[in-house]
Image (tube, rainbow, N blue to C red):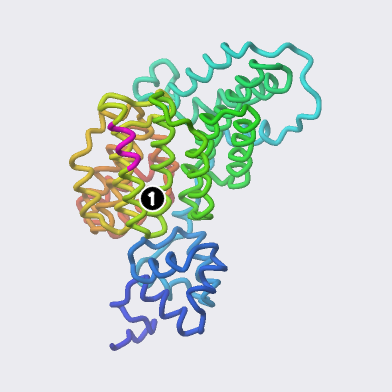
Amino acid sequence: MPETPDTGEVPQLTFGQRVQRARTRTGRTRAYVADVMGHSEEWVKAVERGTIAMPRLPKLLRLAQVLGVEDIAELTGDERIAAASFTKAEHRQLPVVKQVLNKPQLVAAARPAEPVDVLAARLRQAWKLWHATEQRAARRDFGEGNRTRIGRLLPALLADTRHAARTLEGADRRKALMAQAEAYHLAQLFLSFQPAPDLIMLTGDRAMTAAQDADSPRAIAAAAWYVNHVHRDAGEAAEARVELAEQAVALLPDTDDPECIARRGLLYLAVALSYAKTGQAGDAWRYWDKADAAARRLGDDYAHPWLIFGRGIVGGYAITMHNDLVQPGKALEVADALNLREIPSATRRSYHLIETARAHGLLNEGAAVVSYLQRAHRESPETIQFNLYTRSALPGLVTSGPRMVREDAEDLARELGVPV
């Protein structure tokens, strides 16, 4: 095959073929690459075969280093990547949240703990604010988005749940620990897609510790879901995440209690998403079927009040799975059949719209990408603002997308503060 004179690249090669070429040229085995990358040989094989998408920039840079590739364009070819596009946005309240998370807790505050029923009520309100449609909430919250509203509540909520867990005793302490785990889940969501990987790990560990100290299988299951949910995009430790979810499922009693059924379904969904991320389609859809069966068992109208598990999100995450398995046509078939109104969460609806845009992007349908990103923006501006796909796709649409959508893409990029 003739090579282009300026780069020596073979234009016909896919990303996966370029990875395989670089690996074999340097004599590295799939086992070696898998071990250094912290993945299985099946993951390396899936990358090379193109059954999973090109990883995001941090993992891509690491892969280039493992393969001994000095110029990342040798792997990406014409799939140009602007590092600035992958730069995670920092929320203006991140420093305040960082401060409260890093504050030492050597001595308990000299004040009585807040009653656990009051803490529970505050958490219910916080979850409503996280999931609320931002346009509606704006009238009472002065235009604040979901992440901003939670960022304002988090410092006091984290401090008060931690204080209660340290000072209360008996059954009240157990409830306080469960409330503390929930507060850390909100912190995980606030921190997601921001430049604070250490704090995401910290909040995940603290949430799981609180859940285990409470000796609550339900709280442990929720903590396992959020570890999977927030860490999945990093693509790290997929096998460990699967094991954690399966262990948490085993702790849940097999009853008709909707709380247990919903958490079991969420954990099956977590495993399905992890397998799809690493290209293991058979296992992915086997666990998705289990999640779907749990959702059907709960009924078409059921959605957990803050975990939002139900048939809507099981269907919505099927879009993500097809995208990760590089099956954009199937992803769009699912999207066409999905009723977003069945998902009582603006942040989740916005995410599934972004994933629908990603499917169109895999098919090089720029006009549809912009249209779905605009819809996602109307649902939840701060969800799309901090989403990595959005921040990576918009610059390319502005500079080389279809002429009819470049202006719309530029307007949206400017609105979100995405560098182009």
In depth, the one of 109 and 248 nearer the eye is 248
Identify residue type, mark 1: Tyr
Residue 325 x/y as whole percent = 32, 57
What's the magenta bit mostly, secondary-structure-wise? helix
- Where is mark 1, residue-wise? 389
Q: Residue 189 in the image: x percent, y percent? A: 50, 36
Quadrant occupied by the N terminus:
bottom left
Q: Residue at position x 30%, y 30% from top?
A: 297
Estimate the x, y position of residue 146 in percent, counting from the top left: 44, 28
Whether residue 77 appears in magenta in the rendering, the answer is no
Q: How many marks can you see?
A: 1
At mark 1, the secondary structure is helix
Residue 328 falls left or right of residue 167: left
State which quadrant residue 312 falls in. Answer: top left
Q: Which residues are magenta?
A: 290-296
Side of 32 relative to 360 (left or right): right
* For residue 418, side relative to residue 117 (left or right): left
Residue located 46% across and 85% down the image: 25
